[in-house]
Image (spheres, rainbow, N blue to C red):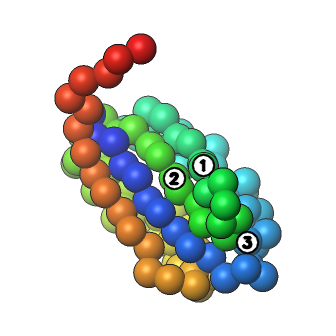
């Protein structure tokens, strides 16, 4: 399983555009083959910073999504809204303490 975290900083006046786009596509992303989980977070103090947190079956599944028309459409629009370069990280869970 791959955990994917993407931190995005949006132009202040484009936050609602991002949220609308996410709302329109979140079910398609979550139901993409290989996606097991999807969350959207908002920074507590900087309301124009959002983070997506997702679980993918494998790196191959994540890459298939990143090569898909869905990703190209969603990301193509999303990146026009940025105020800063996004940061993305992939990781594997080592330990969990409930």
Image coordinates of residue 46 in percent, x first then y, are 65, 66
Image coordinates of residue 86 in percent, x first then y, are 44, 73
* Separation of residues labelled 2 and 1 (CA atoms): 5 Å
Image coordinates of residue 98 in percent, x first then y, are 41, 14
* Separation of residues labelled 3 and 2 (CA atoms): 14 Å
Please identify the quadrant where the N terminus is shown.
Answer: top left
Q: Is residue 18 above or below residue 28?
A: below
Q: Is residue 67 left or right of residue 22?
A: left
Residue of label 1: 40
Circle count: 3
Please name the residue shown 60% across and 49% down the image: 41
Q: Is residue 94 left or right of residue 10?
A: left
Q: For residue 85, what is the image quadrant?
A: bottom left
Q: Nearer the viewer, residue 4 or 41?
A: 41
Residue of label 3: 15
Evaluate whether residue 73 shows in this view. no
Q: Nearer the viewer, residue 54 or 58?
A: 54
Residue of label 2: 52
Q: Is residue 56 left or right of residue 18?
A: left
Please name the residue shown 25% across and 45% down the image: 91
Task: Determine whether label 3 and label 2 are within 8 Å by CB.
Answer: no
Disc 1 secondary structure class: strand
Task: Determine whether label 2 and label 1 are within 8 Å by CB.
Answer: yes
């Amino acid at each position: 399983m791959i955990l994917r975290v993407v931190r995005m900083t949006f132009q202040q006046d484009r936050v609602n555009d991002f949220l609308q786009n996410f709302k329109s596509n979140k079910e398609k992303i979550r139901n993409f083959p290989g996606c097991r989980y999807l969350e959207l977070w908002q920074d507590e103090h900087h309301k124009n910073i959002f983070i997506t947190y997702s679980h993918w079956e494998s790196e191959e599944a994540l890459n298939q999504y990143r090569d898909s028309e869905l990703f190209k459409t969603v990301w193509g629009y999303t990146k026009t809204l940025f105020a800063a370069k996004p940061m993305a990280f992939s990781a594997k869970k080592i330990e969990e303490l409930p």
